[in-house]
Structures are given as structure tokens and as C-alpha cells.
Image (cartoon, rainbow, N blue to C red):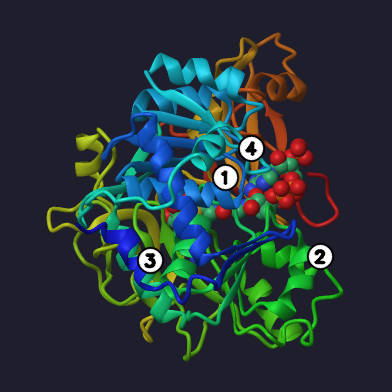
Amino acid sequence: MTNHLFDAFRARIPAPDRVLMETDDGRSISYGDMLAWSGQFAHALVGVGVQPGDRVAAQVEKTPEAVLLYLACLRAGAVFLPLNTAYTLPELDYFFRDAEPRLVVCDPQKAPAVQPLAASVGAETLTLGRDGRGTLADRAAQQRTDFQDAARGPDDLAAILYTSGTTGRSKGAMLSHENLASNARVLTEHWRFGADDVLIHALPIFHTHGLFVATNVVLMAGARMLFEQKFDPGRVISLLPRATALMGVPTFYVRLLQQDSLTKDATRAMRLFISGSAPLLAETHNAWRERTGHAILERYGMTETNMNTSNPYDGERRAGTVGFPLPGVSLRIAEPESGKPLAQGEIGMIEVKGPNVFAGYWRMPEKTKAEFRDDGFFITGDLGLIDADGYVHIVGRGKDLIISGGYNVYPNEIESEIDALAGVAESAVIGVAHPDFGEGVTAIVVRKPGSAVSAADIAGAIAGRLAKYKHPKQVIFVAELPRNTMGKVQKNVLRDAYKDIYAAGKAG
Ligand code: MCA
Ligand code: AMP
């Protein structure tokens, strides 16, 4: 019996005593430990009734045990559903209702509030804390270490990751074993990862970047990771001499550049710095090269597609571009409305096809259909062009999306919350250039006549409903919103009017 993705990882294990993870609190987990403990975790999942195809939702802190839970889900044939630790109870409630998990794993402190939500959809709740302890770990500790992996083929689901839509509800992107395996294999080769690599892993593990790009590549290479609970620029610099590679969002690089201890000497042992999830400013790329002598390698992906393009390992890493389509990925620029392919150099919709592209949105066949062309290309919603040398440039977004510190924020979701307040007539949420987060979430609000609703009222209403990173960094009140002749709010006019509010030295 084969288990498509886990067998691929298993085949790359260099030796059982080789280290897979070193944590910031001094723990060291070998590949042999990973095999034994993920087997115990898999037994624990089966013990609470998890069967192949069942969803296992996890809102847990970043610990080695959280990685074991992910691997245990693969081995048990379950569908892993990681959730951002910042999500609030109303957000969780939606995901549980939509995905109908068999099991929910959460922090012990959150369990009293989460358990009733899980129970309302018939899910069991187990806990896993910041210290790696909890009812899941307790149950796992009593299990045998050998586990007969569930048979899973290339097209079976490995994970569902939720991604918000520009309109309407969040959508669960269904990722198959082969989606993840093919991308991990391609990235490992393209970026030349091998058993001697040591990756600084300081990303969260509930989104594609930290889970599938960083963790899967390490597993596929039989490499090691320095597993940091959260990103701390000083710590990362202190780890550089022991590492060979770093993966980060642009905010990582901006914050690292603020450290005087970031020097050529400090980065001498490193072979690769990779950036993605949001545009890396050419300014940051150039400053990094000047300070360290390394050219950051920028790549481009999406939750639905994993990684699509990458700058070259050997050739020129061109600032402001996301490089070339990865091997096996077809990428074209098309006319957004008709899907007609455009000539080289023209700006249009980026569309992709390949083994990396997801299987569709969970229980949303109509939405899935709407985002694919008839010939199978996925419509990314990103606008771009291919230059004369074949480099892909992302020049804008066809979707109303803000990316703040690498997290996607959908204005529609925040506008709905603000508009629901009694004193608010209407609102527009926009992304404004921000020196730290890339874009700062900003709310432009029109009060109802006679209303005195304040920025604090808005913050108070959103708290507890939306994850913190979605909260507006500034709220600006205006008499009316600019509209075009069709009556549509002109967000470009607003973005232009407020483009300097976060300029260095200003509040926010
Ligand atoms: C934290 N805050 C944020 C963000 N993160 N606000 C806006 N945007 C954010 N990204 C809030 C905190 O709640 C806090 O609020 C305040 O901002 C400052 O917190 P700070 O300590 O500065 O933040 P941090 O904890 O240091 O986090 C910043 C971070 C983190 C390290 C950049 O956001 C991060 O790890 N981002 C990576 C996200 C990621 O992995 N994205 C990949 C998605 P207060 O002070 O009021 O409490 S996958 C993807 O996009 C695709 C597939 C791809 O291509 O990779
Ligand atoms: P997510 O929904 O978290 O998967 O975010 C995917 C989106 O992030 C893409 O559709 C792009 O808009 C954006 N993105 C990812 N990598 C890059 C990059 N290197 N440059 C610009 N945008 C990026």
C-alpha cells in the first residue's frame, strides 16, 4: 500500500539519527523521532474515529508536535485543515460549519470556547499547547510507534486551506497529495536543497509558505530546520552562521535590514535567501545585496496553486520580477474577460496550469468552475506581463486584496463589519503603502448624518470578530466616497489620496 506524499518524504530520510528540527528552546527532533512520533499521533487520530478523507482542523501554536500532527494526518489519510492562530471564534465557527471536521485540535486555553463550536458540527476536540502538551499529545504517548499508513493516491486530498474571496464566503482550497508532492519535488531541485541544508524556519505553519514551501521542501530534501516559534530579527541573525537558507515574507527582510548586526560576515555561511507571499520592493532587494552580497531569490505562488514561478538559482535574480515558470508549470498572460492569450510584453491576467494547481474549492463547484478556463488554466486574479527575457512581472491585482506582512486581507470582509455599525453609512477598505507591512489596512468611513461614531467604536466592534492582522491600522472619516459614473467606489482615487499616511516617521 502506498501513501503518495508521506512515502515521498519517507524515501528521503537521510538516516534515523539525523536531525530534522531544532527548536528555539533547545529541543532536537531526529528523523527517527519524526517517524515514531507521527506514527503515535496517527494512532491517536484513528483512536478518536478519524478515517481516511475526514477533515482534521487545527488551530495550534507553532511546535514540533504541530508538524507531527500534519504528518499524522497524511499517514492516517485525513485531510489537514490548518487555521491561523489569530482567527476569532466567529471565524472558526464558519470554517467548522463549512468543512465539517471529524476532529478539532486547539490550544488548551481556547478549548472551553472552541469545544462547543466543534461539538455543534459533531467534531471531537483535543488539545495541543504551546509547550507541545495536551490531550492529543497525552493520547499519542500511549500509542505504538509503528503505524500502517493509509493508502492514498496522487489525487486524494491531503489538505484544505481556506482563502478568503473578494466577494462572499471564504473558500477551502482542496490540495491533493500530488499537488503538494510535485511542488515540493520541483522546489527542492530548483533551489538545490539537499541533506546538508539547514533552513531557518521562522514562518507560521498554518499557511502555504511555512507549511508546504518551507516544511515540505525540508522533508523532501532530508534537510534540517531551525524551528523558531516566531520571527525575531535578532534571533534570526544569530542563527545565520549555523544555517544555509532562509525563507521569508518581505517584512522579514525589511526588519532584518534594520539590524546593524546584519553584515556580509554574518551571512557568510548562507547560500540562499528566498522571498515570497507579497511583492519584494526592488529597494529592499538592492539594499540586501549591498549589505550582504546576496541576491534575494523571489518566487510567486498562491494557496490554490502552491508555487508557480521562481527566479533562477544560477542566472540573474531580477529585482521586481518573480522569475520564470517552474518546471512543469504552464503560465500565460490572457485578456481578463475573454481569456484570449496576449502577446509577450502585454499586461493581462496571469493564468497557470500544472500538477501544482489545486483540485477545486471545497463544496463550491460553481466557484471552482468560474475560476478556471475551459482548457484547464486557473485564473489567478493577479495581473502581470512576461518581459522579453521571459521573466514574469506582477504589476497589479485584478482582485480586491490587501497583503499585509504576507497575510491576505480581503477588504470586503472588513467593510461588511464596519457597515453593520449603526452610525456608519458606508466604508471602503484599502491597502496603503506601509514601510513595515508592505501595505497597511486602512478604512475610509462615511458617517450617517448626526452620527458621532469614532475610530475607537470601529476598533471595538471588530475586536473579537476579525483576526488582529485584518484590523485597520488607521480609520479616516470622510463626507463621501469618490465614485465613477457607474456609481462604483474608486479605490484607486482613495489609494492615491492617502498614499503617504504611513510614510516613515508617521503614525501607524
Ligand atoms: C501581526 N500584526 C499584523 C501582522 N502581523 N498586522 C498586520 N499585518 C500583519 N502581517 C499585528 C499584531 O497583531 C500586532 O498588533 C501588531 O500588528 C504588531 O505586531 P508585530 O509584533 O510587529 O508582528 P509580528 O508578530 O512580528 O508579525 C509580523 C510578521 C507576521 C512576522 C511579519 O505577520 C508573519 O509571520 N507574517 C508571515 C505571514 C505568512 O506566512 N504568509 C504566507 C501566506 P498589536 O500590537 O495591536 O497587538 S501563504 C501565501 O501568501 C502564498 C501562498 C505564498 O506565495 O507564500
Ligand atoms: P494567498 O491567498 O495567501 O495564497 O496569496 C496569494 C497571493 O499573494 C497571490 O495571488 C499574489 O497576489 C500574492 N503573491 C505571492 N507571492 C508574490 C510575489 N512574490 N510578488 C507579488 N505578489 C505575490
Q: Residues within 10 Å of mark 4 (few under 14, many from 20)?
A: many
Amino acid type for the residue under numbered disc 4: Gly
Q: Which residue is mark 2?
A: 234
Amino acid type for the residue under numbered disc 1: Val
Q: Residue furthest bottom?
A: 315
Q: Are marks 4 and 3 in contact (CB under 8 Å)?
A: no
Amino acid type for the residue under numbered disc 2: Gly
Q: Given this view, does label 1 or label 4 mark the residue nearer the observer?
A: 4
Q: Left or right: where does residue 468 sit relative to residue 52?
A: right
Q: Residues within 10 Å of mark 1 (few under 14, many from 20)?
A: few
Q: Are marks 2 and 1 in contact (CB under 8 Å)?
A: no
Q: Which residue is mark 3?
A: 9
Quarter residue 386 falls in? bottom left
Quarter residue 180 falls in? bottom left
Q: CA distance from mark 1 to mark 4?
A: 46 Å
Give above or below for 464 relative to 243.
Answer: above
Q: Secondary structure at mark 3?
A: helix
Q: Given this view, does label 4 or label 2 mark the residue nearer the observer?
A: 4
Q: Residue furthest left?
A: 374
Q: Which residue is mark 4?
A: 129
Q: Secondary structure at mark 4?
A: loop
Tag 4 or tag 1, which sits nearer the N-term? 4
